[in-house]
Image (cartoon, grey):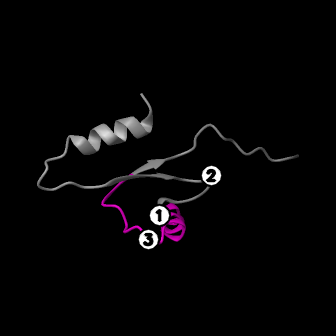
Amino acid sequence: MSIKTRLEKLEQRQPASTPKKWELIGVLNGETEAQAIKRWKANNPDKTEPENIIFLVPFGYEMSEAA
Protein backbone atom coordinates (compact mmCIF):
# COMPACT_ATOMS: atom_id res chain seq x y z
CA MET A 1 0.00 0.00 0.00
CA SER A 2 1.45 3.36 -0.99
CA ILE A 3 1.92 6.28 1.38
CA LYS A 4 -0.63 8.31 -0.57
CA THR A 5 -3.24 5.54 -0.21
CA ARG A 6 -2.57 5.31 3.52
CA LEU A 7 -2.94 9.07 3.82
CA GLU A 8 -6.31 8.95 2.05
CA LYS A 9 -7.50 6.18 4.38
CA LEU A 10 -6.36 8.21 7.39
CA GLU A 11 -8.35 11.24 6.17
CA GLN A 12 -11.44 9.05 5.64
CA ARG A 13 -11.32 7.77 9.24
CA GLN A 14 -11.74 11.26 10.70
CA PRO A 15 -15.10 12.38 12.09
CA ALA A 16 -17.15 14.10 9.41
CA SER A 17 -17.82 17.07 11.66
CA THR A 18 -14.16 18.05 11.91
CA PRO A 19 -12.31 16.93 8.79
CA LYS A 20 -8.65 17.88 8.75
CA LYS A 21 -6.38 17.88 5.76
CA TRP A 22 -3.14 15.92 5.95
CA GLU A 23 -0.14 16.90 3.87
CA LEU A 24 3.00 14.99 3.03
CA ILE A 25 6.06 17.24 3.12
CA GLY A 26 9.45 15.93 2.10
CA VAL A 27 12.41 17.05 4.17
CA LEU A 28 15.58 17.52 2.17
CA ASN A 29 18.86 16.18 3.49
CA GLY A 30 20.15 18.59 6.16
CA GLU A 31 16.89 20.57 6.28
CA THR A 32 14.87 21.22 9.44
CA GLU A 33 11.11 20.71 9.66
CA ALA A 34 10.61 24.49 9.81
CA GLN A 35 12.66 24.94 6.64
CA ALA A 36 10.66 22.19 4.92
CA ILE A 37 7.38 23.92 5.82
CA LYS A 38 8.73 27.26 4.58
CA ARG A 39 9.80 25.65 1.29
CA TRP A 40 6.40 23.91 0.98
CA LYS A 41 4.61 27.26 1.48
CA ALA A 42 6.77 28.88 -1.22
CA ASN A 43 5.99 26.03 -3.63
CA ASN A 44 2.26 26.05 -2.79
CA PRO A 45 1.22 29.70 -2.36
CA ASP A 46 -2.43 28.93 -3.14
CA LYS A 47 -2.78 26.42 -0.28
CA THR A 48 -3.22 27.19 3.40
CA GLU A 49 -0.81 25.64 5.87
CA PRO A 50 -2.01 22.12 6.65
CA GLU A 51 -3.30 21.29 10.10
CA ASN A 52 -1.60 17.91 10.07
CA ILE A 53 1.74 17.16 8.49
CA ILE A 54 3.56 13.92 7.85
CA PHE A 55 7.22 14.61 7.21
CA LEU A 56 9.03 12.34 4.78
CA VAL A 57 12.58 12.30 6.10
CA PRO A 58 15.50 10.86 4.15
CA PHE A 59 17.71 8.43 5.98
CA GLY A 60 20.65 6.28 5.09
CA TYR A 61 22.52 9.09 3.40
CA GLU A 62 25.92 9.56 4.90
CA MET A 63 28.24 12.30 3.83
CA SER A 64 31.79 11.16 3.58
CA GLU A 65 34.63 13.61 3.89
CA ALA A 66 37.52 13.30 1.49
CA ALA A 67 40.72 12.85 3.45
Residue 22 picture location, percent across and down: 34, 52
**47 inside magenta stretch:** yes
**Circle 1 — which element?**
helix
Name the image quarter holding the N terminus: top left
Q: Is residue 24 above or below residue 47?
A: above
> Residue at label 1?
37
Residue plotted at (23% across, 42% down): 12
**Circle 3 — which element?**
loop
**Quadrant location of residue 60?**
top right
> Residue at label 2?
29
- Is 15 placed left or right of 3 in the picture? left
> Residue at label 3?
46
**Quadrant location of residue 59?**
top right
Residue plotted at (58% across, 58% down): 31
- Mark 3 Cα-neighbour bin, 10 Å: few <14, some 14–19, many ≥20: few
Residue 3 picture location, percent across and down: 43, 37
- Is 39 placed left or right of 50 in the picture? right
Amino acid at dot 1: Ile
**16 inside magenta stretch:** no
Q: What range of the chain is rendered magenta?
A: 34-53
- Is 46 placed left or right of 64 in the picture? left
Nearer to me, 33 or 63? 33
